[in-house]
Amino acid sequence: MSNTSKLSRFIEFGRKIVAVGRNYSEHAAELGNAVPTKPILFLKPTSSYITAGNPIKIPKGCSSLHHEVELGIVIGQRGVDIQENNAMDYVGGYILALDMTARDFQDEAKKKGQPWSLAKGFDTSCPVSGFIEKEKILDPGNVRLWLKVNDAVKQDGNTKDMIFNVPFLISYISGFFTLEPGDIILTGTPSGVSPVVAGDVIRAGLADVTEIEFKVEKK
Ligand SMILES: O=C(O)/C=C/C(=O)CC(=O)C(=O)O
Ligand SMILES: [Mg+2]
């Protein structure tokens, strides 16, 4: 089996999801945060993945579930301390993903200085598209990302506005976490995050490469 067809089954590998926070200055500002001087990283469990046809379930006790549309990098080969100048060799492909966030849980955690695991890692918090072959995205540093809730546009950004670009993120992250085939890096969300409620339908797209649709339900 080719490496590409193995990577297309990244969900079955059960590898890491490393997510980057506040990587777009307008998004940092809309939540009242300073622009970071180095990447902010957190992990989402692989049990948070869902694919087309499965609903996003609002976790118990959450009254403010936010959408965050993000470009995901699928790692293609193992790497430690990867240099920025050859970081793109470690990209096996891409996905379009939602970093669903229980914003009220996150706000409470932030106040108490606690981790974001519940806010970001609950079941169904990582809806994903199918695997996108590397060749389909010529420049991950210039690709449009959009998201609609019930046909109203909420997010419409471009990865060129990332504070830390894809090669830098791969290099930085691999200095702390060994990157392995099937790992995902979620590269952060552009501005426009907003709450969704049960019955809403989220649609999102990555340039003209892929679109995803997920319904929101009560747990
Ligand atoms: O600091 C906050 O209030 C929120 C940060 C995030 O949720 C970070 C992200 O996941 C992101 O920027 O994509
Ligand atoms: Mg995010």
Image: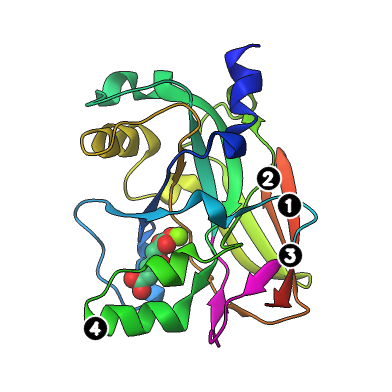
Q: Earlier in the sequence, mark 1 or mark 2?
A: 2
Is 15 placed left or right of 208 in the picture? left
Q: From the image, which quarter does the N terminus lie in? A: top right
Dot 3: what SS? loop
Circle 3 residues within 10 Å: few <14, some 14–19, many ≥20: some
- Label for residue 104? none
Q: Which residue is mark 4?
A: 112
Judge whether residue 153 is colored magenta.
Answer: no
Residue positioned most to the top: 1
- Label for residue 129? 2
Q: CA distance from mark 3 to mark 2?
A: 13 Å
Q: Are marks 1 and 2 in contact (CB under 8 Å)?
A: yes
Residue interval drawn in magenta: 55-68
- In the image, ligand 2 is in what quadrant? bottom left
Q: Which residue is mark 1?
A: 212
Q: Which residue is mark 3?
A: 55
The residue drawn where x is 59% and y is 30% is 137
The residue drawn where x is 22% and y is 26% is 81
Dot 4: what SS? helix
- Residue type at tag 1: Ile
Q: Earlier in the sequence, mark 3 or mark 4?
A: 3
Q: CA distance from mark 4 to mark 1?
A: 35 Å
- Residue type at tag 3: Pro
Q: Which image quarter: residue 135?
A: top right
Q: From the image, which quarter does the C terminus lie in? A: bottom right
Cβ of mark 4 under 8 Å from ligand 1: the answer is no
- The residue lying toward the viewer, choosing from 206 and 61, is 61
Q: Is residue 53 above or below residue 29?
A: above
Is 164 placed left or right of 16 in the picture? left
